[in-house]
Amino acid sequence: MILDARTVPSGTVIESDLCIIGAGSSGISLALQFAGTGLKVCQVESGGLEPDRELQALADGDSIGVRYSSLASCQQRCFGGNGNVWGGWFTPLDAIDFTARSWVEDSGWPFGAAELARHSRRVHDLCEVPEDDYDIGAVAKLGDPAARLLPFDRTLIDSVLYRFSPPTRFGQKYRAEIAAAHNITCYTHAHALSLKARWNAREIDRVELGTLAGTRFAVRARQFVLATGAIENARLLLLSNDVATSGLGNEHDLVGRYFQDHPHTKRALVTGPAKFPLGLYGLAFRGRGLAAGLALPPRLQEAERLLNYKASIYPVFYGEDSAGWAAFRTLALSLSRRWGSDLYDRFALPFRPRGVRARDVAVMILAPHKTAAAALSHAFHLDRFRVGYVLESKPEQAPNRDSRILLYDQRDPFGLPRARIDWRLRPIDRRTVVRAEELIDGELRRLGLGRLAPLGPGETESWPKEFAGGWHQIGTTRAHRDPRHGVVDADCRLHGVANLHIAGASVFPTGGAVSPTPTIVAMTLRLAEHLRRTLMATEPLVAGAA
């Protein structure tokens, strides 16, 4: 069942076998694996069932490093979390992403790609992706002459296949299933304030919770899972410092470190008078759940000591640079329950109220021809309104110990320090993009298809003015077998703490160059296996409502 924590009497202590803190894509995926079992599960979610401006403001924080999005905009606080706004891009990490690369400091996972691949079918089912074949040759099955690939030299630039989730809105898709599970109780509006450890910090006794209405209560459990996203996972561990004074799991000063994202940049692709053969690389096949992208082959990454890299090519339509189109897009996304984010732009509406705003309508009316042209072109892929193309680069970020989440002195309504993000990038991050785009430019010229627009002054060493993270918060509680190099072990258990595990992209040692959601869900299913073995080894509580 799903209950509002504001109805829980203050001082209540809820007993459960498993307590899941967070109800985003990882928290919901984990809870579903225990539905109908003999184990009593308590799930707590900071937000409500729908976005709320007051609750969203709890995610506010500070940024002192490379420019980053507002923390309140890139972390959705409601049932479903960021699983309510992801764009649906669906591709697993590459095998090279799991390896310890000599040219990438602090790279390497505690297991290989095969460990997650065994969960592939279930991951695809949860995310409503019918096919799990990523062989680029599979496009031949389409039998469509328009589904063509560009004949790049594959030793320099490879083509990769993306599949797409509808996208699955976890908070909507699985709400009824969580509500109907007899052994799961999910409390919304329940903010985790602190994890209370026993005297030696080797075991968690309870999580202290509060609501903005003033209620205070706790959950005791045999096992706890922290699944609140990379920023809040680190923040809660640092806040839980009454026994471990530097924060839980922070004996080696690693909690919050190695924060990563995917820095996205755009660069114009200049073509000649002939029509550019966009084929699978554009928008035309999105309705069939797939598209092609560009990548650096693993052998080239190793030979040139580069990071992983992916890129997409998009058509640019007449009117896209107008305020009217921006207003229309904002309005359309705010009204849509299916799309909470744009497929190919870093744009989301985590707390904007749904509905029509007079200001948006007025802006659209001022340039109706541009608004209409852009809207129709996106809806129907009208080539007659195409005015150009753009290459969007989406590289891996190298692990960086100094890129981190900290606490700072501004307090939230519960009196707790807010998060401060210090996002830092390395020279190899920019060098990878510059070299990849140089190779793409060379191949476009060789094939007589066009060229990339020149970089601006200084942009071979520094990032262009218009670049942004992909809202893919990764790292901060990284996995490593050695506690001197990681916060959690290979089973995602906090080093030195018997009953606290962490779920989500915060445990990724590296993030590859693809959306983290498929890997988040795969890691969650692997964690569920481990927790079921652990919990079934001892006598469970009597299942039922908390």
Image: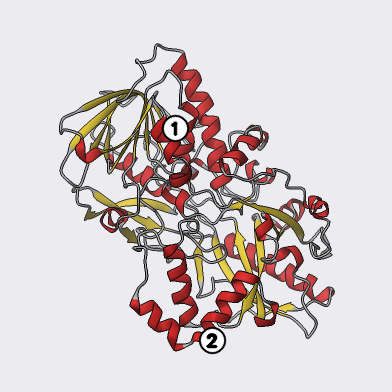
Real-space CA distance between mark 1 and mark 2, rounded to the nearest whole angstrom: 48 Å
**Residue at the disc numbered 1:** 31
For marks 1 and 2, give the one nearer the viewer: 2
Q: Position of residue 510 (x, y in %)?
A: 56, 47
**Residue at the disc numbered 2:** 369
The residue sitting at 32% across, 47% down in the picture is 47
**Disc 1 residue type?**
Ala
SS for tag 2? helix
The residue sitting at 65% across, 68% down in the picture is 434
Circle 2 Cα neighbour tier, 10 Å, few/some/many (<14 / 14–19 / ≥20): some
**Furthest residue toward top:** 539
Q: Position of residue 280 (x, y in %)?
A: 74, 63
Q: Is residue 306 visible?
A: no
The residue sitting at 49% across, 85% down in the picture is 368
**Disc 2 residue type?**
His
Rendered-image quadrant of the C terminus: top left
The answer to which image quadrant residue 42 occupies is top left
Rendered-image quadrant of the N terminus: top left
